[in-house]
Structures are given as structure tokens and as C-alpha cells.
Image (tube, rainbow, N blue to C red):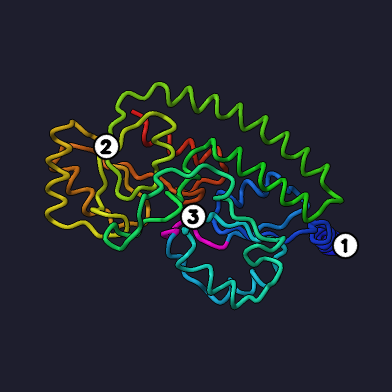
């Protein structure tokens, strides 16, 4: 009898989830679950343990895209290396670029670090700007509003529920932002070096200054000459923090830190990269590491 009741509950919940939503990354997936609630079934395509530029395009992802009602992507060129071929193979007209079931989140946030020109001589730059906007906890507000609008468009019958979920989430998130802002206001050392420009939005939000990157150019491995220049620069400017992501090699940052008298801070780039389970845990983890 218990098995029958359990199966019945499972089937009921599946039937209740009216929209199948795929998101490219975990943070967007978490926001979608907040807004969609039981009306959506969310699948995150890219693992937060890996470089978001180079998610392995597994055949299993094709099946997930094939049955999706909505695809929410980060945009800004971040998925360029892996998502387009999967979308072509999935052959799902509902989620192609420009279709009703397609949402490019980069169109709903203000991008920074927009280059004046693009060429291979500048490394792997993104023409639309820095795509790592989800490092800014305030970007969550814009993301939530865009998701609610799209879900209501696809499922107008449940528009009232989506709007109610949005209102509740925005209220709760603003309370959380006030607490995070208070925490970040206590930070003393606001000079950093990054491995890759993953955290520019967070740094800008809270008044940090980035003095350079372990990469000489975006996507280019550090050279010996650049490493020595960075060490000297950090000594001259008394920079004591290196922000290291979870997926790049860590040997170079540790070497630079040892020579410059600095400390390497491992910072998650996406929800789950540090084992976090909730949006609050994710941003709290970033704040705990960077704030000193």
C-alpha cells in the first residue's frame, strides 16, 4: 500500500509540473525553481564543478534539450563552445534562438567590460562584455523578473502563481541582500588579483579593486614573464589576496602568493561549485572567502 501511495504521489507531482525547463548553469536553475515552484521541472545542463566555457557536450544533454519547453541560457558568449551543437542535434524548434521557449538572460542584465574591439590578440574576450554577471547577487533580481515573465508567457494559465512566487522571492532576496551588504561593509582589504575575470561584477558591487589577473589575457595560460611581473606588481601595491576559481590549475596562484606574501582564496563561480545547496549559501561562501 505504501508503495502504491508513493507511486501515486510521484505521478501526481510529475503531472503537476507543466513545464520542462533546462538552464545552462546552476544559479539560473535555482532562481527558476523559486519562481516556477511545483509548476516546473528544472534540469541544469552544465556542472558547476567545471569551466563554464567548456562544458562537455554529452549525448545525454541532447535528450534533455529535445524534450524541453524552455531553455534559459547565460548568454554573452559563455556557452558558445558547447551549447550550439547540442541545440542543433536536439532539433527542438521550441527552444531555438528567437523561439518562444528561449531565454537569453544576458539581455536582461547590464554587462560590463564590453571591449571596444575584438581579436585573438586580446585573448578569449567576449564581444558583448563579461558574461559572469551572476557573481553579483543583485543580478538575481533581474534574473527572477525575466524568468517570471517568460514562464507566464509560456503558461498563462498559471501566471498568477508565477507572479506571486516572484513577489515573495524578491521580498525575501532583498532582505538577504541587506544582510550581505552589511557583511561586505566590514571588509578591510579590498585589493585583489584574480586568476580569470570571473568575479568582476561582485568586486564592482562591493568596491574592490582588481590589480590584474594570473592569466596574461583571458583564456591564455600564465607565462613565466607575466608571473614575475604580477609578483612585483603585487609587492609594490601591497596586494594580499588572489582569487582562484575551482577549475583552473592552482599551482601558479600558490607560487605567486608565496613570493608576494599573499593568500589564495578559492572562490566558487556558480552555485554548487563549493558544495553550496542554496543561493544564500553560494553568496555567503563567496563573502566568507573574500572578506577580511
Say which quadrant the N terminus sits in. bottom right
On the image, the x and y values in percent for residue 208 come to 35, 31
Q: Give the mark nearer the N terminus: 2 vs 3.
A: 3
Disc tally is 3
Which stretch did the figure color magenta?
45-52
| Residue at horizontal 75 percent and vertical 40 percent from the top | 165
Question: To which quarter of the image does residue 248 belong?
Answer: bottom left
Q: Neighbour class for label 2 at 10 Å: few (<14), some, many (≥20)?
A: many
On the image, the x and y values in percent for residue 211 come to 25, 38
Q: Is residue 47 magenta?
A: yes
Per the image, label 2 sits on a secondary structure element best described as: strand
Q: Nearer the viewer, residue 147 or 125?
A: 125
Q: Nearer the viewer, mark 3 or mark 1?
A: 3
C-alpha gap between disc 3 and disc 1: 51 Å
| Residue at horizontal 54 percent and vertical 35 percent from the top | 138
Instruction: Give the residue pinned by disc 2.
Output: 241
| Residue at horizontal 70 percent and vertical 71 percent from the top | 93
Instruction: Give the residue pinned by disc 3.
Output: 76
Q: Nearer the viewer, residue 137 or 12?
A: 137
Q: Give the mark nearer the N terminus: 3 vs 1.
A: 1
Q: Main secondary structure of the magenta part?
A: loop
Q: Is residue 153 magenta?
A: no
On the image, the x and y values in percent for residue 114 come to 41, 47
Instruction: Give the residue pinned by disc 1.
Output: 1
Give yes or no for contact between labels 2 and 1 (Cβ–Cβ under 8 Å).
no
C-alpha gap between disc 2 and disc 1: 59 Å
Looking at this rendering, what residue extends furthest in the front direction?
116
C-alpha gap between disc 2 and disc 3: 28 Å
Per the image, label 3 sits on a secondary structure element best described as: loop
| Residue at horizontal 65 percent and vertical 62 percent from the top | 98
* Left/right of residue 81 with respect to residue 10 in the rendered view: left
Amino acid at each position: 500500500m505504501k508503495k502504491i501511495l508513493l507511486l501515486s504521489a510521484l505521478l501526481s507531482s510529475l503531472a503537476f509540473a507543466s513545464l520542462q525547463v533546462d538552464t545552462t548553469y546552476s544559479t539560473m536553475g535555482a532562481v527558476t525553481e523559486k519562481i516556477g515552484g511545483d509548476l516546473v521541472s528544472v534540469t541544469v545542463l552544465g556542472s558547476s564543478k567545471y569551466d563554464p566555457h567548456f562544458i562537455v557536450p554529452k549525448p545525454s544533454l541532447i535528450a534533455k534539450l529535445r524534450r524541453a519547453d524552455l531553455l534559459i541560457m547565460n548568454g554573452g558568449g559563455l556557452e558558445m563552445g558547447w551549447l550550439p551543437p547540442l541545440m542543433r542535434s536536439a532539433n527542438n524548434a521550441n527552444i531555438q534562438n528567437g523561439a518562444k521557449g528561449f531565454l537569453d538572460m544576458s539581455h536582461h542584465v547590464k554587462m560590463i567590460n564590453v571591449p571596444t574591439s575584438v581579436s585573438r590578440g586580446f585573448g578569449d574576450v567576449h564581444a558583448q562584455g563579461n558574461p559572469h554577471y551572476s557573481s553579483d547577487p543583485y543580478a538575481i533580481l533581474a534574473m527572477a523578473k525575466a524568468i517570471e515573465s517568460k514562464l507566464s508567457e509560456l503558461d498563462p494559465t498559471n501566471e498568477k502563481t508565477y507572479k506571486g512566487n516572484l513577489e515573495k522571492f524578491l521580498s525575501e532576496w532583498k532582505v538577504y541582500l541587506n544582510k550581505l551588504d552589511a557583511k561586505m561593509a566590514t571588509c578591510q582589504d579590498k585589493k585583489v588579483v584574480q586568476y580569470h575575470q570571473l568575479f568582476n561584477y561582485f568586486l564592482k558591487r562591493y568596491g574592490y579593486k582588481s590589480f590584474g589577473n594570473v592569466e596574461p589575457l583571458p583564456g591564455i595560460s600564465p607565462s613565466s614573464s607575466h608571473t614575475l611581473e604580477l609578483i612585483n606588481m603585487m609587492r609594490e601595491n601591497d596586494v594580499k589576496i588572489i582569487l582562484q576559481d575551482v577549475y583552473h590549475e592552482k599551482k601558479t596562484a600558490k607560487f605567486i602568493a608565496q613570493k608576494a606574501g599573499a593568500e589564495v582564496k578559492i572562490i566558487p563561480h556558480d552555485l554548487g561549485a563549493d558544495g553550496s545547496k542554496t543561493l544564500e549559501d553560494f553568496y555567503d561562501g563567496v563573502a566568507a572567502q573574500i572578506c577580511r
